[in-house]
Structure formats: C-alpha cells, structure tokens
Image (cartoon, grey):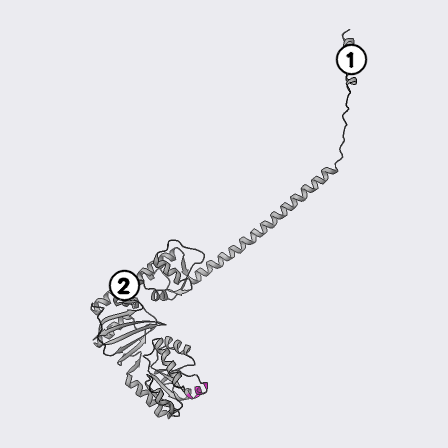
Amino acid sequence: MLDLLIYLRQARYRPEIERIFPESEYHVSIASDMEQVVQRCQEDLYDLTLVWAEGYDEIADFLTVLSIHKFDYLPVIAVLHSAEEVPAVLTLPIADFVVLPVSRVEFFAKIQHVLQDLDIQSTVLEGMNWQGSLQEYNLVDLIQMVESGQKDAILLMQYGDKQGELLFRQGKLIRAKYQNLTAQAAVFKLGFWSQGNFQIKFSRLPSVEVQIKESNQEVLIQLIQKLAEQEQLMEELPSYFDEIVVNPLVQPNHLTPIQQRIWEFATHPTTIFELLISLPEEDRDLLKALKEMMEKRWIGRRQDIEKLVIEAERKSSLSKLFSSISSIFKRRAVVQYEEMMTEEAEIEMRIPRLLVKRRYLSKADRLLLSRAFQTGQSSAKR
C-alpha cells in the first residue's frame, strides 16, 4: 500500500479524490494548509505528495515549505486545472504533472511511473531509496544496512524540526553532522533516537573530506558501549518521554554549567528525549547532571512537581487563614482590655470617699496645750 499526501485547499474536490483512490492500494492523507502539511510529514512517512488544483505560486510555496522543513526528498506531482499553466510549472522541481480532467488509467499510470523512476518503497528495504520509522530501526541497524549495500549513500534522521545527516562511501561511514556536532560526536548524539523517521538515499557522493577514519565496526562498538552506559543511567530516571519540569519552590545555588542549561531548558515541561536531542553536551554528562538535580528535587516529574506546588499553595492559604484569625483575636483582646480599664476607671470615680480636714493649731493654742500638759504632770507627781 502506498502512502500519499495531498495538499488540497479547495474542498469541492474532496469527494472526487475519495472516489478516485482505492483503499486497498492507497492510503491518502489530505492537508488543507501548510501547517497541516508540515505536521503530517513529521508524523508519518509518505511515498508521494500531490498539489491538487493549484497554480504556479501555490505549488512554489508548497515546495519551499518542504525544503525549509527538510522534506524536499518527497516527490511532488502537480495536479493542474489548466494546460496553460504547464510551461510555468515545469520550471519548478516537480516529479510530474497531470492536467484535469484526466482518466483514471492515465492518472494512476502517472503515479506508478513516478514511483518506478524513483524506486521508492515505503518502510521496505527493496529499492534504491529506503525510508521508515526509527521505532523499527535504530542507528546501529541502519549503519549495518547501508554497509551491506556497499554503495554511496546519505542517511537522514529526522524528529520534528531536528535532522541528522550521515554520509557513506561504498558502505563506509565517513561523515556525520547533527546541529553543531560532527563526526563521532554527532553519531553518538543520534544513536539513541527511538522516535522519528529515517531515509536512505543511494547516490554517488561528491568529493568530501573524510571525518570518520575508524571502521564501521569500531564506530558501532563505541556507540553500543555508550548506549549501554546511557541505559544504566536511565534506570534511575523517568522514561525518555515522561514530562519533567523545574521545581518553582526552590532556587538552587551553585549550578554547574550543564545543570544551568538543563534548568533553563526545563523551565517549561519537556521530556528527557527532547532535552538530550536539544542540548549539545554528551548524553551521559546530561543524564548524570539531571540525576543529581532530581535527587535534590530541583527538577522532577511534572505530576510530582504539580502536587508539591498544590500542597504548598494549600499550606500557604491555611497559614494566611490562621494568621488572619489570630490577628482578629488579638484585636478583640486589645479592645476588651481597653474597655475593662475604662470601666474600672469609671467605677473608681463613683466610689464615695470621706475626707477629714486636718485642724490647724495656732501658736497660742499650742502654748496653752503645753502648759496644761505640764500642769497635769506636776499633779501626778504629788
């Protein structure tokens, strides 16, 4: 069964397309805009693409988008609604064209002719171009497969907008590139990919400098050793596709440069797979740094971090509630004390008091009292 992607903006042609292609021979996906085209190509593998009932400008835009996103290896057939557009369209890098209306026999003959010219077989190793899913074939498998062919080849590995490229001369791996990495560093970075697509193009290579002088077997032995070390580290970490995120409740100090890059990358939920394919450091060093950060709870599984945040927010809310209640009671106690003191002062003012005015004796009175006292003493002696 062949997988076709059809770029169709005019909905009136959809019923006709659904009638044309037999389900037993073709699996057809339809994209109505460029964003869907890119998404479909990232998610699935296609043998052929068709631009349906569009003019020169739209076809050129379609080809440009494929090129920007590294899907320009896909052959394109332009389905035209006017023969007048043929001369202009033929200046574009398309595989073939069809002018509507056309008979089913001629239409399918065009498709088969393009496929035969390009020797495309989807996910089956029976042609001069191989393509498939990295879930089925990893890099170790692919290097051995190309080596067995003993031909010049380009191996493309793609996941989303990220792409790696490996060059082979007569089956021998001579160059590799991924982002800013080259040679073995790029090979080791691509080695663990278990998601995405691959395509192998067999064609004569131009004269290029050999970066990788080791034999394929030597490269594979090193790659397998690194993958084994990586799997050991992964035993104590979440899976490659579990989401992780930084813990917003902590602010770690003294981060190493690698840990700082991990921290910045994981400020938004991501996966370990995305982390490894995005950062340039060796995967082993990244995993060791990540393991230490997770042990210190600086980073964790997204669901675990979300639970911690929810619990912290709940405790904070309770603390604020208790603080508010406590302040209310304190204010009430102050008011009650002030009221009590005021009441006591009022009561104290209402209590009756007896004031005894002290008599003041003049000097003459004190003299008389003194004489009387002396006279009394004299009488007592006699």
For label 1, count other residues whose C-alpha is less than 10 Å away and answer few (under 14), some (14-19) or many (20+): few
Mark 1 element type: helix
Inspect the image, locate mark 2, and give the three-letter code of the amino acid beneath it.
Answer: Lys
Q: Which mark is residue 226?
A: 2
Whether residue 104 is visible, yes or no, is yes
- Residue 298 drawn at (x, y percent): 40, 57
Q: Is residue 146 above or below residue 227?
A: below
Residue 302 quadrant:
bottom left
- Residue 171 drawn at (x, y percent): 22, 74
Which mark sits nearer the N-terminus, 2 or 1?
2
Foreground label between 2 and 1: 1
Instruction: Please name the predominant secondary structure of the magenta segment in the image.
Output: helix
Q: Is residue 198 left or right of residue 52?
A: left
Q: Is residue 250 left or right of residue 155?
A: right
Residue 52 quadrant:
bottom left
Instruction: Tell me where the magenta segment starts and ends, as one range.
Output: 11-16
Residue that appears at 78% across and 9% down:
379
Mark 2 element type: helix
According to the picture, the residue beneath numbered tag 1 turns out to be 371
Inspect the image, locate mark 1, and give the three-letter code of the amino acid beneath it.
Answer: Arg
- Residue 271 drawn at (x, y percent): 38, 65
Q: Is residue 332 above or below residue 187?
A: above
Residue that appears at 30% across and 85% down:
115
Residue 141 quadrant:
bottom left
